[in-house]
Amino acid sequence: HEWNVDFPHLMLRAKAINFKKGDTKFRDNIITSTDMIGKVASLPGINTLVNVGNKTAPIRAMLDKTLGIHKDAKLPPYTSKPARKTHGALIFDPQKAADKAIENQAANATVHERVTLFTTCYCNYNEPSIADSVIKVFEHNGVGVDLAAREHCCGMPKLELGDLKTVEKLMEKNIPALYETVKAGNVIVAAVPSCVLMFKQELPLMFPENEQVQAVAKAFFDPFEYLHKLHKEGRLNLDFKHSLGNVSYHVACHQRVQNIGPKTKLVLELIQDTMVKNIERCSGHDGTYGVKSETLEFANKIARPIVKQIEQQAPDHYGSDCPVAGRHIENNLKNKAKDSQDAIHPLDLLCLAYGI
């Protein structure tokens, strides 16, 4: 644009003004509190009630009328075994990290890197299998995995709501714990592009004077961006046991704006007899747009070109780096044909190819 207008951030400023005025629905405050919902909904027993309720027509009709959650929007299931609970042994310990560094130095080790996995609300509470896959893939490639001592929502849902004060509070909770791991030499990965974008670009823009925010941003990688780096250095394990055939791959919007290139496609095509076709369109879900009563139909309409491309390509597998986008595409495919296959996250596809 001749005026060089940053339109997305212009809209975020408008949302922040509206939020400050109090022009925000109660529902939107609730559904953007993803870590709070996750903590409650993943409690043993509670998760069963939530999951059953999400599939019960009278309850969904009530949510539609009272909260404005569309009765036909498929809501994600909640596990009673969050990823951070399952992998509690991986929580970062500064003393152990220091001892390990001394051991590596004594052994004259040339490669002793570790990554910190920011599990994300979704992969922690809704699909912990994706977090499992991150750990499996990195360990299979000789890279150790840690979890930060504390983790809260990255703040992207609240940023898109315009709630900047909560974004700052979440930053103040997350950054010190992540920075501790960066000081020890770790890089950081997350399996949801929105979370990567938040730490890589949004928080540094909001807090340019915060040195810890800037250090964390420099250390943050998309998982496939880092795996591709390993490959370029000749260190990626290429001993794949299975091919994936034809893969329809949806490139998430929040990954595209990171300008890292088609790293997922490049890594997956290292697998023998595997061809990946990129689909670069918005899925329409947008985190909350695909569940609201007033916007679900629009979200489904936006997804139609993607659905059409997948139907035409008839792939062996399809999926998206954004697990929410993948499920939204899946739901739209199943609305047309109930027996259509499920979306598979690219990290799960990599596990399948490795046979792990």
Image (cartoon, grey):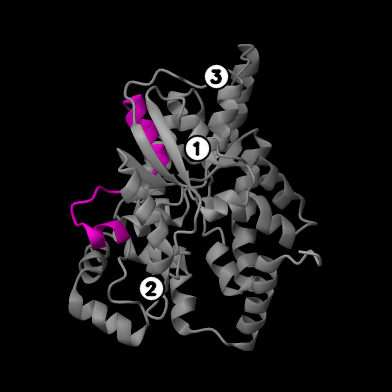
**Which segment did they paint magenta?**
332-355
Residue 92, percent from left and from top: 53, 39
Horizontally, residue 356 falls left or right of residue 214, namely: left
Q: Which of the two residues, 320 or 16, is positioned nearer the viewer here?
A: 320
Residue 274 lies in quadrant: top left
Horizontally, residue 168 falls left or right of residue 116, namely: right
Above or below — where is 339 with respect to 135? below
Residue 291 lies in quadrant: bottom left
At mark 3, the secondary structure is loop
Amino acid type for the residue under numbered disc 3: Arg
Would you name the residue on which mark 3 appears?
Answer: 235
Residue 236 lies in magenta, yes or no? no
Q: Quadrant of the N terminus?
A: bottom right
Numbered badge on residue 296: 2
At mark 2, the secondary structure is helix
Report the mark closest to the observer, 3 or 1: 1
Would you name the residue on which mark 1 appears?
Answer: 264
| CA gap, disc 3 and disc 1 | 17 Å
Mark 1 neighbour class, 10 Å CA radius: few under 14, some 14 to 19, many 20 or more: many
